Image (cartoon, rainbow, N blue to C red):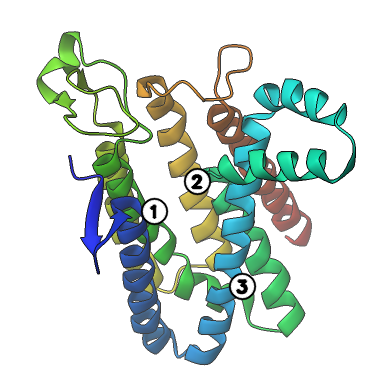
Amino acid sequence: MYPFVMIFDRAVSMYTVCALSGLVFAFLLILILARVHKTSIEDCLYTLVFCVMGMGLGALLLNYITKLPAYIPVIHTLSKSTGLQGLIEGLRFFLMDVGFVFYGGLLGAIVTFFVYTKWMGFDTDKMLITMLPAIPLFAGFGRIGCFLIGCCYGKEATGVLEPVGIAFTNSPIAPNGIRLVPVALFEAGFDLMLTILLVSLSAKKAKGKKLLMLYLTLYAVFRFFAEFLRGDLVRGIWFGLSTSQWISILILIVVMASYISSVRVKKVHI
């Protein structure tokens, strides 16, 4: 594929290019929806900035949590080192292993959104229908970047999946020369469909929290099954399920509990 592109004589990861492009298009979509819903563009911009910071922190944190079993022996070894040298070695190890996990970024952005909008006294529901459709749009661009560089690659394409398999030739991450399931492209396509669905419902001024619950439900179900097609080894496998699958299950439980709670409240008011 095309893992890197030369910009001003520097090799830049295509994931970075796609992620930044996704951020730009996500912001443009927010501008369009802000005009439709008569939401303050300035409020959306500040909210977006804080959500991006929350997304980065959440994605980085979940990356470290996912790899925690591999860190324990290293931490044990470094703990035996004393003085400044041990501290430097520890910082160097963690900084060299920087990575981002989508679910961590998603949850980090959502938590930041609610904290910031509540703190600023914004109309949370109105902000949700304005900004939520931008999430799958941004994520879709990110998954295209994943495909181009070869991270988040799929299992070897065999059986009924063999015709859709794609072989990498110069990926620095995925195994080259083997036809793999393009799971990143599958998710990019799904994110595009989610974007269209959310924009359509947003234009009809659906309730923001219901829109969020719908997005989380659809993505959690898709991600749970898509994980079975993933081939990269650092998946945080616990009891046969990956970290992302356990998070998907947790999200579905929370959404279901929230729905049941809202139904009970309505019955009480009736």
Where residue 108 sits in the image (x, y, percent)? Answer: 63, 55
- Counting from the top left corner in percent of width and height, residue 164 is at 14, 25
Query: Residue 67, image x and y in percent?
Result: 63, 29
The residue wearing badge 2 is 102
Marks 2/3: CA–CA distance? 17 Å
| Quarter in which the C terminus is drawn | bottom right
Residue 182's place in the image compared with 155, above or below, is below
Label 1 with label 2: CB-CB less than 8 Å: yes
Q: Which quarter of the image is occupied by the N terminus?
A: top left
Q: Which comes sooner in the sequence, label 1 or label 2?
A: 2
Secondary structure of residue under mark 2:
helix
Q: Amino acid at mark 2?
A: Phe
Secondary structure category for the residue under label 1: helix
Q: Which residue is mark 3?
A: 50
Question: What residue is shown with label 1?
Answer: 139
Spatial CA span between label 1 and label 2: 8 Å
Q: Which residue is found at the position 57% from the left and 58% from the top?
A: 55
